[in-house]
Image (cartoon, grey):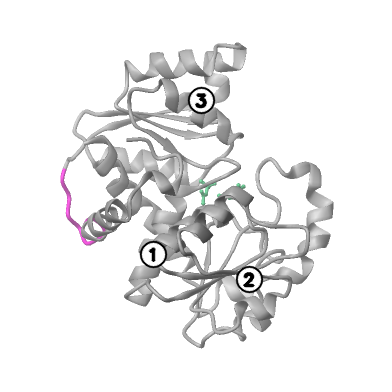
Amino acid sequence: MHLLSILDLKKKDIEEILDLAIKMKGGEERKFLKDKNLAMIFEKPSTRTRVSFEVAMRQLGGYAIYLSRDDLQLSRGESISDTARVLSRYVDGMVVRALKHETLTAMAKYSSVPLINALTDLEHPCQAISDLLTIKEFKGTVEGLKLAWIGDPNNVCNSLLLLSSLFNINMTIGCPEGYKPDEEIFNKAKGMGGKIELYDDPYKAAEDADIIYTDVWVSMGDDSEKEKRKRDFKRFQVNEKVVSCAKESVIVMHCLPAMRGKEITSEVMDGKNSVIFEQAENRLHSEKALLTKLLS
Ligand code: CP
Ligand code: NVA
């Protein structure tokens, strides 16, 4: 089974991953992936995803091989399909962070071992699954909650939209006019019964929210629009005023890396509602559960 999009998993699969992640976080230690090998191909930088997957493999008894694009013959023109076919003969799974989602869909056609999306321009499913663990941990239940996404409706937002529709989380998006989530994903999420509302007002979007979530205004690959984006998103900063529109018990989330003072203030990031570093830690526990589900 590949994990390119949240929709590659059923709700039941995700629930199993979360249950296992909770057990693993609680200290259950089993070498579910003893002597298994994972190739990790990264076309873009990473702190959390790379390190959490690498440590996860080691804790599960297996091995991880990190490969930047420049380490591979891909950089000299070897095709994606040949790369996938060859690596499939050596390893038990592949984690890939690609500039373009199409690279992953092309690899998936030729990979005979599970392929895991470690972020593309379209989705970041591992992040979203891990975030559900954090939400469950802090809120007890997830169904019926209101998640306000404030800022750029990007890859992380796309995966959260799909996941929210599966788990009956209501999502509001506060972003400037001219920005919107991926249309196909938005329509899929709506088609699954997702309750999604879009506002060009951050305060309206954050009203009565149980969760406020933000991410960088300039994602990897968007650098050519950097200055324009900084101007366009200025009003959509997660600060005390935005947080005060939400429920008193609101939790503030950010997938990180954060640009402090841009999409989120340090005051909020380090404030009493922030669960951001717990959220970052959960990447390790959820990655262990995910790898166990897909590779064992
Ligand atoms: N949140 C996340 O995926 O972070 P990295 O880019 O550091 O992996
Ligand atoms: N949206 C960000 C997420 C980083 C984890 C990016 O794609 O750069």
Residue 212 screen position, x and y as percent: 55, 72
Residue occupying image coordinates x 64% and y 58%: 153
Which amino acid type is shown beneath numbered disc 3?
A: Ala
In this rendered view, identify the residue nearer to me: 205 or 51.
205
Q: CA distance from mark 3 to mark 2?
A: 40 Å
Is mark 3 in CB contact (under 8 Å) with mark 1?
no
Which amino acid type is shown beneath numbered disc 1?
A: Phe
Q: Secondary structure at mark 2?
A: helix
Residue occupying image coordinates x 39% and y 43%: 8
Residue occupying image coordinates x 21% and y 28%: 35
Q: Where does label 1 land, which residue? A: 167
Q: Which residues are magenta?
A: 24-30
Which amino acid type is shown beneath numbered disc 2?
A: Ser
Residue 223 screen position, x and y as percent: 75, 43
State which tag comes first along the sequence, 1 or 2: 1
State which tag comes first along the sequence, 3 or 2: 3
Q: Where does label 3 land, which residue? A: 106
State which tag comes first along the sequence, 3 or 1: 3
**Residue 64 position (above or below residue 205):** above
Residue 25: in magenta span: yes
Is mark 1 in CB contact (under 8 Å) with mark 2?
no
Q: CA distance from mark 3 to mark 1?
A: 29 Å
Q: How many circles with numbers are drawn on the protein? A: 3
In this rendered view, identify the residue nearer to me: 265 or 15.
15
Quadrant for residue 262, please give it: bottom right
Q: Where does label 2 land, which residue? A: 266
Instruction: Decide: few, some or many residues near mark 3? Use Cα within 10 Å; few <14, some 14-19, many ≥20.
Output: some
